[in-house]
Image (tube, rainbow, N blue to C red):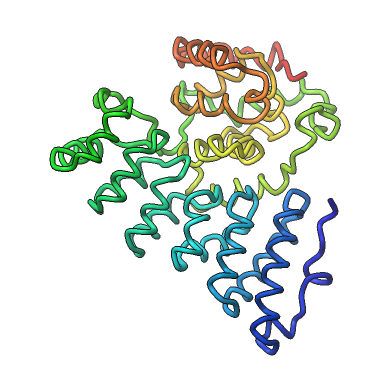
Amino acid sequence: MQAANPKTELVDWKVLSGQGDRGRSDELMRHVATLFSLTADHCTQEQIDTYDTVMQRLADLVCAETRSFAAKKICRLNNAPHDIVRRFAFDLISVADPVLRNSPVLTDEDLVEVSDQKGEQHMVSISMRKSLSMVVTDVLIRSKQGSVLIKLAANSEAEISPVGMRVLQSLAANDQMLARELGQRDNVVRLDSQPSAPTPIEPQGSVSLPELWQKIEPMVPEAMYNLTRHSYLGRYKFENSIAKAERFNKQGLLDKAILRQFACNDQFADLVCGISVKSGFPHEIVARMMSSVQWSQVLSLFKLLGFSDRLVQDILECGPWMLCLSRNQCAAVVKQYLALTVEEARSRALLWPQEGLLLD
């Protein structure tokens, strides 16, 4: 579907200036949000920015019901404009709920800020997200709001730190519902384990991945940079994802928690570009590595980036691997990763400039 140009096709600028009636503003907001939801995959970054500007202006003019409609339309989009999604997240709960539960563009920083500034209802919505890092869950647990803690305990995908788990267990001694939900969680009995933490991505094994890529680059055929004819990768708009990854990295937000969020929400293009920015490997090469079953090379890259086994498991359930790997096959690959040492990964990677990468 061809993306509409909101500068010329969508906008009645008299309405945006507040000169139109309320009904017209509501109608326009519904139209813009619906059109964006239908064409988002084909929008350029410039068009996305324009949609953001238009919806932000309309949000000042329309009723809560219309804002809620717009929030529901864009809440699951991987490339929804961050600013309007963030604005909805701080709105009335009827508006905020869909984005707080579902939006993949909200960062840990956004969620923590909403938790600190808004009430129990907003925190309940956050606690029901598909992916939550310990940075966020620690803040939710500190609130000691009963309904928040129960929803959080019931969310098996939420990462809870050992300290946070001890607080929950202590509170559960006087709360039967919380105790029941905690009893269903696997990590209750594994307090000594270390879940993947939202720490910065630091290369392991004394290997400079950008320098390694410079040595590999001369051996890579030019055709490997063209993804348009690839049976799977050709469907993605990596340009927008590269811009997002670079922006997150500049803001200091591109860490393992963000990558896990991308993986859990099947934001394959964002995940690829995040790994590209952190590794120094071009996104086209990372994308090919992450659509291949040449496990030796891609697992070595992940090991050198310091990825946890939990993060690798989530990555295997995203993008092309999600379509071709069974649960047992995923488990087998994770087992390979657990057995792989940093030194072995380093030794393998140092051979890539001589042997090349298998990218077909």
Q: Point out the image quarter for the C terminus.
A: top right
Residue found at the far bottom of this picture? 19
Quadrant of residue 265 in the image?
A: top right
Does residue 166 appear to the left or right of 97 in the view shown? left
Please tell me whether residue 185 is drawn above or below residue 34 in the rendered image: above
Asked whether 213 or 123 is in front, the reply is 123
Residue 60: tell me if it is visible.
yes
Does residue 254 appear to the left or right of 293 in the view shown? left
Asked whether 121 or 335 is in front, the reply is 121
Quadrant of residue 75 in the image?
A: bottom right
Residue 215, x across and y down, in percent: 68, 23
Residue 341, x across and y down, in percent: 45, 13
Residue 215: tell me if it is visible.
no
Quadrant of residue 232 in the image?
A: top right
Residue 239, x across and y down, in percent: 73, 46
Please tell me whether residue 282 is drawn above or below residue 171 in the rendered image: above
Q: Residue at x 65, y 65 (%)?
A: 52
Does residue 291 appear to the left or right of 148 in the view shown? right
Residue 225, x across and y down, in percent: 79, 31
Asked whether 159 or 240 is in front, the reply is 159
Q: Residue at x 74, y 48 (%)?
A: 41
Please tell me whether residue 251 is drawn above or below residue 269 in the rendered image: below
Q: Residue at x 74, y 39 (%)?
A: 236
